[in-house]
Image (cartoon, rainbow, N blue to C red):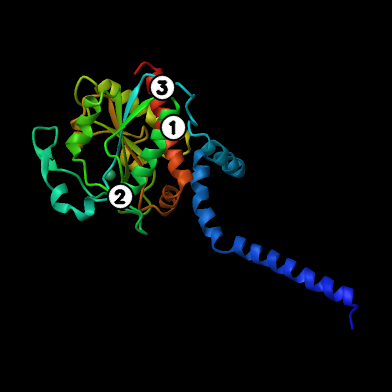
């Protein structure tokens, strides 16, 4: 009974309504839990500033576009920075090679390397550390630094932990930052920590580097793992062979807890990886500007 024009208008309107419904149900459906999982990470940045969460979320992608975010272009001209992304993609399939005993830096020996940890859904630490290492390298180079890496891909085996310490001095690096993530069993464990070795003439410099890294990780909104590292986020350990074998100022960053669902979700994203890299690069920048 409807006028033909009205009928065709109704036909046109229908697909429009369906598109709208589809978009709405997608927005209320699967993506919702994901964004609510990520939100605490962003709001942790500004404790109690939940009302600014939207603003900071929209600001972050803009920051992420700038490869040298967190440090001025040319600021690291003339420096050589060593990065050690933990573990390697081929370790798990070459157990005899990575179980070979190597100097532990304490007069003893320990296994060449380990496979590392993984998130509950199988995203592996070596892939995360490689992604953060690559992003940090890009930012450091944009700031004028020469970057040397302990490994050149995520498909190899090793290198062994002694080499991961000694290569920095051999390559003429001013400092070394080792990148890892924790695998604490409890899913409620959360946050980052920085570790240095209380050894050698460079211990005071390592401590300054560690503190600068902690400050910049906090600044990027990452929470300190107080249970594991205390309120200052900094531990001293003598059992980490990479640190013990290094003879330049050195710090190891445990970026987050891979068993923590919200941190795991963040660690899998390029934006999250870039934020960890930005914090590490800014920490390195602060250390260098303070005179090393
Ligand atoms: Zn590790």
Residue identifier under label 1: 139
Q: Quadrant of residue 167?
A: top left
Residue identifier under label 3: 76
Residue 196 in percent (x, y) is at 27, 31
Q: Nearer the viewer, residue 205 or 228?
A: 205
Measuring 19% from the left and 22% from the top, which residue is drawn there? 200
- Sequence-first disc among 1 and 2: 1
Residue projecting furthest to the bottom: 1
Any part of residue 217 in sight:
no
- The answer as to whether callout 2 falls within 8 Å of ligand 1 is yes
Q: Nearer the viewer, mark 2 or mark 3?
A: 3
- Quarter of the picture containing the N terminus is bottom right
Any part of residue 171 in sight:
yes
- Asked if disc 1 and disc 2 are in contact, CB closer than 8 Å, the reply is no
Residue identifier under label 2: 183
Residue 184 in percent (x, y) is at 30, 50
- Asked if disc 2 and disc 3 are in contact, CB closer than 8 Å, the reply is no
Measuring 38% from the left and 22% from the top, which residue is drawn there? 287
Crowdedness of circle 3 by 10 Å Cα count: few (<14), some, many (20+)? many
Residue projecting furthest to the top: 291
Q: Is residue 257 above or below residue 76?
A: below
Under tag 1, what secondary structure?
helix
Q: Nearer the viewer, mark 1 or mark 2?
A: 1
- Sequence-first disc among 1 and 3: 3
Measuring 65% from the left and 62% from the top, which residue is drawn there? 23
Q: Ligand 1 is located in which of the four quadrants? A: top left
């Amino acid at each position: 009974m409807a006028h033909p024009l009205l009928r065709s208008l109704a036909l046109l309107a229908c697909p429009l309504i369906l598109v709208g419904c589809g978009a709405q149900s997608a927005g209320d459906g699967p993506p919702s839990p994901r964004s609510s999982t990520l939100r605490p990470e962003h709001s942790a940045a500004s404790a109690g500033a939940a009302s600014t969460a939207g603003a900071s979320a929209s600001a972050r992608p803009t920051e992420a576009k700038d490869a040298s975010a967190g440090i001025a272009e040319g600021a690291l001209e003339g420096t050589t920075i060593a990065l050690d992304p933990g573990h390697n993609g081929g370790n798990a399939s070459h157990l005899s090679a990575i179980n070979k005993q190597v100097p532990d830096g304490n007069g003893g020996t320990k296994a060449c390397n380990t496979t590392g940890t993984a998130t509950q859904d199988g995203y592996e630490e070596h892939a995360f550390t490689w992604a953060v290492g690559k992003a940090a390298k890009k930012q450091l180079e944009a700031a004028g630094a020469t970057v040397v890496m302990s490994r050149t891909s995520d498909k190899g085996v090793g290198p062994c932990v002694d080499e991961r310490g000694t290569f920095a001095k051999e390559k003429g690096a001013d400092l070394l930052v080792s990148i890892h993530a924790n695998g604490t069993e409890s899913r409620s464990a959360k946050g980052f920590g920085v570790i240095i070795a209380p050894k050698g003439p460079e211990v005071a410099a390592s401590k300054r580097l560690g503190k600068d890294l902690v400050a910049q990780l906090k600044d990027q909104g990452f929470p300190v793992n107080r249970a594991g590292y205390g309120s200052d986020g900094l531990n001293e350990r003598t059992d980490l062979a990479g640190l013990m074998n290094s003879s330049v100022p050195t710090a190891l960053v445990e970026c987050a807890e891979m068993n923590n669902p919200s941190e795991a979700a963040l660690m899998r994203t390029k934006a999250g990886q870039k934020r960890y890299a930005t914090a590490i690069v800014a920490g390195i920048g602060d250390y260098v500007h303070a005179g090393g």
